[in-house]
Amino acid sequence: MAGADARGGGLEIRELECFLALSEELHFGRAAERLYVTQSRVSQLLRSLERRIGARLLDRTSRRVRLTPLGERFLAELRPAYGALRGAVDSARAAARGLGEPLRLGFQGTADEYVMAVVADFRDRHPGCEVETVEIPLGDPFGALRSGAVDAAIVLLPVAEPDLIPGPAFSRQPQTLAVSVRHPFAARASVSVEELADSRLIGPTAPAPRYWREAMAPTVTPDGRPIPRGPEVRTLQEGLSYVAADRGTMLCCAPTALHQGRRDVAFVPVTGAPESVLGLVWRRSHETERIRTFSRTLAEAVRPPRGAGTVPPGGRGARAGARV
């Protein structure tokens, strides 16, 4: 495409990518960072594209950048066309690099609508690459990765393992406390994080690292009050069974509470507790194009275009999370 007539011949893909980045960022500096070029290069690419079209696509002042009416129309027509072009390139790249093999994706607790919508989007883009979801133990979030049982895993953050690569983080969710319906907290509208010291907290077993188990089941409140220890469990369902038997309480994220239909367990919101966050991780020594491509698909679902609401790829009815 290089060397095309500046008044309307063939287009440069880089010019289109520059315009798309500017239309989402509405900031020349951020667009330059996103494209890994200088700010002056962004200006140059935009001017070249505008010369080809014959009119301004963006208005730039000292205070803000905004699309012109023609720019808005061009953006609406360009996005689906560019998406189709990128999909064709991705499919060809997948065939060339062996993306046709299955991707084994580990998860803990529940792989719900958000995660499965990302999986469906990945399959649509790469029809030859199947995704196999594999439940991994609650008490061993990294074992399946290290043994090769899964290629990547969605786990609760933080992850501080030198042999693992952290991918995109997503699904920030408030925490709830699972309690037996006979527990004094069951009738409460909420409990404070300090009140965790008044109940025995169920946590995951080893070999999960200590810092990770502390995130799942803290041993002290923010004010330093010790939290009594309950049983240690290997799976979410094992933990909820102990909760139902009134042998302890268990921290769970809000989406997990929505997915559990047990009548013997109540889920009470916890105020003052940090949100739980999920992340995709994989082994540094076993990184593949399949993993990188899935990670990009997840990252795109996490970061919608500027000005758009945070809507899971499955639509507004989807709930985020694959977790406990």
Image (cartoon, grey):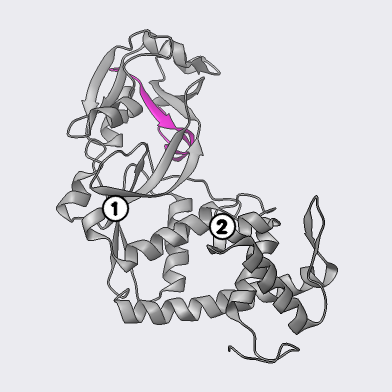
Looking at the image, which residue sits at the far left? 147
Task: Quickly name the residue at label 1.
Answer: 282
Which residue occupies 76% across, 77% down? 50
- Using the image as rendered, state which of residue 136 and residue 29 is in the foreground: 29
Counting residues from the start of the chain, the first of labels 2 and 1 encountered is: 2
- Residue 245 shows in this picture: no
Question: In the drawing, what numbered circle is on residue 33?
Answer: 2
Residue 183, position as x, y percentages in the image = 40, 14
Q: Give the extent of the magenta segment.
A: 245-263
Residue 259, position as x, y percentages in the image = 44, 40
Left or right of 139 on screen, residue 32: right
Query: What residue type is disc 1 on?
Result: Trp
Residue 40, position as x, y percentages in the image = 65, 65
- Using the image as rendered, state which of residue 226 and residue 166 is in the foreground: 166
- Using the image as rendered, state which of residue 48 and residue 132 is in the foreground: 48
Mark 1 surroundings within 10 Å by alpha-carbon count, few (fewer than 14), some (14 through 19), many (20 or more): many
In the picture shown, does residue 242 fall above or below 291? Answer: above
